Amino acid sequence: MHSKSTGLVGNGKWGKIIQKKISSISKLHFIANSKSKYLNKLDKIDWIFIATPDHTHFNIVNKCIKKKVNIFCEKPLTKTYNESLKLFQKAKKNKILLYVDEIQSFLKKRIKIKKYNYITRQKKSFGNPKDLLFRFAYHDFYYLYEKVKNEKISNIKIINIKDCLEFKIDFEKKTFHFYYSLNSEKRIHSFNSINLLTKKDILSKMIKDVLNEKVDFENNKNKSLFANKLIDRIIKKI
């Protein structure tokens, strides 16, 4: 018997993947898209999952907060620090839980942060290199949070933005070099040579832990805002 009832907004490629997962571990009441009339159904569920395009997140999450339903949102919560902060503040005021996809954190791989660090993610796909800040870098920034949250950024250098996304961030004591490409025949995702690709079903693990409230929501908020703030800084350099 499923103890939690859920709804899903977003029926694209990723939405369909999430649908399979939440259907197996909760009672899925409805599936909608961003233009559907789903707000009147929110009082029947415990959690709403949002897997719509990034630019729709703010409005959808904002409406769901007003309905006082717990929210799981695909990353990024929004594309700016200020908008994301507003949503977290509204969620707290309305006493609801708001969680942003943190799937990479469920890998549980030990990554040693060095003085100079190299992170890369490569695959064969289409898209604007700038968008990789939200598609790829956003999750990787979560790994940095605990190690550099009290350090100031001394410099951000954009190395390449034409056929890939390559940049460096210098903190007070550590440097992080990021390289992201959509032109690789081989899938690669590594942090200081630690392979971050996995066949484990970490998506189901994350969703189950969120529904059962076995995650640190405050830490998730801090990581999400940290990623947003970093991306805001990088975009100003591009």
Image (tube, grey):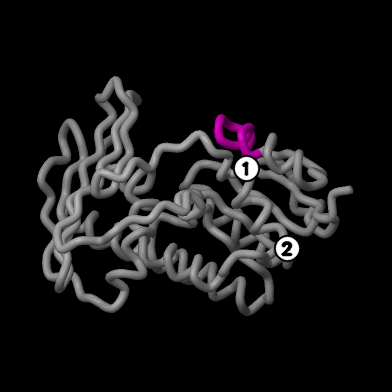
Which quadrant holds residue 215?
A: bottom right
Q: Main secondary structure of the magenta part?
A: helix
Instruction: Specify the quadrant of the image occupied by residue 223.
Output: bottom left
Q: Is residue 222 visible?
A: yes
Identify which residue is drawn at 34% across, 41% down.
195
Location of residue 93 (image quadrant): bottom right
Q: Position of residue 232 (x, y in %)?
A: 29, 60
Q: Residues within 10 Å of mark 2 (few under 14, many from 20)?
A: many
Residue in the picture at 51% in, 52% down: 106
Per the rendering, the mark at residue 34 is: 1
Residue furthest to the right in view is 1
Residue at image position (30%, 24%) is 186
Q: Is residue 15 left or right of residue 190?
A: right
The residue closer to the viewer here, 155 or 112, is: 112
Q: Secondary structure at mark 1?
A: loop
Residue 11 is a magenta residue: yes
The numbered disc on residue 95 is: none
Q: Amino acid at mark 1?
A: Ser
| Up/down of 186 relative to 90, above or below | above
Counting other residues with Cα less than 10 Å from the Cα at mark 1, is it few (<14), some (14-19), or many (20 or more)? some
Q: CA distance from mark 2 to mark 1?
A: 17 Å
Tag 2 residue? 69
- Residue 208 within the magenta-colored segment of the rendering: no
Q: Amino acid at mark 2?
A: Val
Dot 2 or dot 1: first in sequence order is 1
Pinpoint residue 228: horizontal percent, then vertical percent.
Answer: 37, 61
Residue in the foreground of this view, choosing between 20 and 115: 115
Mark 2 secondary-structure assignment:
loop
- Range covered by the magenta-colored residues: 10-18
Counting from the top left corner in percent of width and height, residue 86 is at: 50, 71
Which residue occupies 81% across, 52% down?
5
